[in-house]
Amino acid sequence: MLLHYVGIRVVLVHGGGPEISEKMKQMGKESVFVGGLRVTDQETLEIAQMVLVGKINANIVALIAKCGARGVGISGSDGNLILARKMERQKVEIGGVQKEVDLGHVGEIEEIDPALLNTLLGTQYIPVVAPIAIDRYGGSLNINADTAAGDVAIALKAYKLVNMTDVEGVMDKGRTKVFRKLTIPEAHGLLKSGAIGEGMIPKVNSVIKAVENGVSFAHIINGNVEHNLILELFTKDGVGTMLSLK
């Protein structure tokens, strides 16, 4: 809200992985991940839509209203914001053997149409986006929220992309050091070396893509620590990891 009130136009793209996993557990389903992405059958997709759109998105909009601003909850399907296609089968090593895995209703983003977001931003609303996309046949696809946020930032020609997660930032292989600043080549090197774990892979890939496509700076910070967003954006040293071209 502070960013909004000082004139920074904010778009909030949210995920909901832990809540989806918990709801699946309550319904007797086990969560399976491949390369940090959730394997999504039809029932899992319906659970994801229920949790992301019906619960988390609505709760965030209510919190924004409580703080005196105006939030609008949408999904990637609204206004054809996120157009996607079904993701191709992914290669994964199981028991030392390379196999191809079908992730189900998981989408790869084809196109972002920012028209609806620009309309909302232009009238002082804060868009809150759930990462459920639409395909060319009107079907729904689950999109990784980190990937969606990065692509939305590119489409909006955003100055900054901030990824709020539950760790301090990008860390070394021993998980003892947080990299405060990384160039894109350095980030690629960490990915290739295996220093970056599964859950962080989509986050790092999304911020790399964003910076390579016009976003000036990208940040990965711990959103569980009070004031971290302000400290990262408005102090010299910051509290998380900042990525830039060089």
Image (cartoon, grey):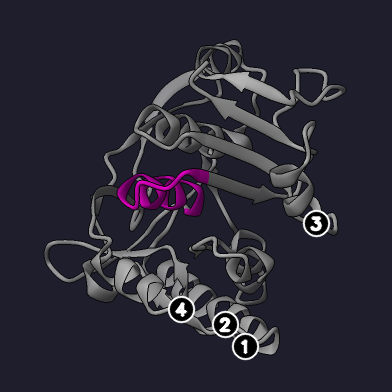
For marks 1 and 3, give the CA distance: 21 Å
Residue at x 59% of width, y 47% of height:
162
- Position of residue 115 relative to residue 167, above or below, is below
For marks 3 and 2, give the CA distance: 19 Å
Residue designated by label 4 = 125
Magenta stretch: includes residue 173: no
Q: Amino acid at mark 4?
A: Tyr
Residue at x 51% of width, y 19% of height:
184
Q: Residue furthest left?
A: 137
Q: Find out whether the residues at labels 2 and 1 contact each other: C-beta distance under 8 Å.
A: yes
Q: Quadrant of the N terminus?
A: bottom right
Q: Amino acid at mark 1?
A: Ala
Q: Position of residue 220 (x, y in %)?
A: 65, 40
- Characterize the magenta stretch by its predominant secondary structure: helix
For marks 4 and 1, give the CA distance: 11 Å
Q: Element under label 3?
A: loop
Q: Position of residue 41 (x, y in %)?
A: 39, 62
Residue 117 as seen in the image, left or right of residue 14:
left
Residue designated by label 1 = 65
Tell me where residue 79 sits by quadrant: bottom left
The residue stretch that appears in magenta: 145-160
Mark positioned earlier in the residue sequence (4 or 2): 2
Residue 83 as seen in the image, left or right of residue 177:
left
Mark positioned earlier in the residue sequence (4 or 1): 1
Residue designated by label 3 = 224
Given this view, does label 2 or label 1 mark the residue nearer the observer? 1
